Amino acid sequence: MKIKSIVRKTIFIGALASTLLVVSCKSKKSLIQNSTSEPLTEMKVSSIIDKHYDNQTDFSAVYIKSNVRFDNGKQTQNVTAEIRIKKDEQILVSIRFLGITMAKALITPDKVSYYEKIKGTYFDGDFSGLSQWLGTDLDYNKVQNMLMGEALDDLRKGKYTQTLEDISYRLDDKANNETQKAFYIDANNFKIRKQEVTQSNKGRKIEMNYGNYKNYDNKIIPLQLQINASQEKGKTEIDLEYTDVNFSDEISFPYSVPNGYKRILIN
């Protein structure tokens, strides 16, 4: 099994999306555990969006430890990831396999950097590689939102049609372009249950499912995240289960490329 390839792709997709439960056999079950027997009533789109942002997680920094399962149809691997986020400034992801740090990735609003130990290589560049791996255009805010269970886009800046689906309000972006976006907002807590980005003309789609939301002193975060990315060359699934979450201003972000590592380019 090519651990190097798995580590690199896991970094780019998970968080780098997380470098990103262990749902394996459980992965076919619904991730969201809340439900309601009450029939949904239509709401104004603006009211749904307002309620979503009223319930947005406000934090300055967070440490997350996660189990990660990677599957691209050819290879399957379980690793652990430590994710550190300083809101709007930087994301540091450390990947471990069998207890050994195999790679680190640092994401800032300006660039994506990572290094891996197996071949002694490092990458330092923009978000184009990450976007290519995932099959959708990404930037720092979208990666941060993805990991924290927030809508990828700022819903307050768009126009949407609304439909009722299961126990969610589904908002479809009305923008007339080549990218279709759908956001499923839970009717109970107005958090994101699922979000999808589809580029049919390019054969690309990414779907993010969230579950098991937990309240940490009024900071609500999903403990389960399932990322399904598909494009013409194949499909990739990354399942994350957050096993430890700590909101603190005292989190450090140690990152430096070891001496002697070779820089690589990703096309």
Image: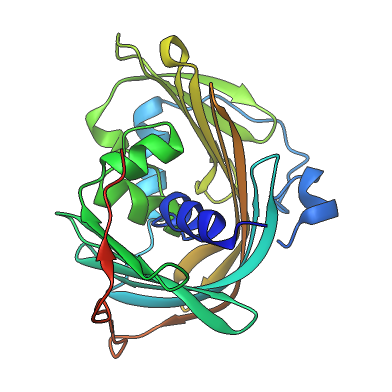
Q: Give residue 166's position: percent from left, percent from top.
A: 70, 30
Quarter that holds the C terminus: top left
Q: For residue 153, which quarter of the picture?
A: top left
Q: Nearer the viewer, residue 210 or 90?
A: 90
Q: Give residue 4's position: percent from left, percent from top.
A: 52, 60
Left or right relative to 74: residue 207: left
Give the number of marks.
Answer: 0
Q: Nearer the viewer, residue 121 or 96?
A: 121
Q: Nearer the viewer, residue 34 or 142?
A: 142
Q: For residue 41, which quarter of the picture?
A: top right
Q: Residue furthest right?
A: 25
Query: Is residue 165 shown above or below 124?
Result: above
Q: Residue furthest left?
A: 110
Q: For residue 33, which quarter of the picture?
A: bottom right
Residue 183 visible (yes or no): no
The residue positioned 43% from the left and 59% from the top of the image is 148
Query: Is residue 189 shown above or below 183?
Result: below
The residue positioned 43% from the left and 74% from the top of the image is 117
Left or right relative to 132: residue 24: right
Q: Give residue 83's position: percent from left, percent from top.
A: 43, 72
Colouring of the image: rainbow
Q: Residue furthest bottom?
A: 250
Left or right relative to 129: residue 82: right
Quarter that holds the N terminus: bottom right
The residue positioned 65% from the left and 80% from the top of the image is 98
Residue 2 visible (yes or no): yes
Q: Give residue 199's position: percent from left, percent from top.
A: 42, 18
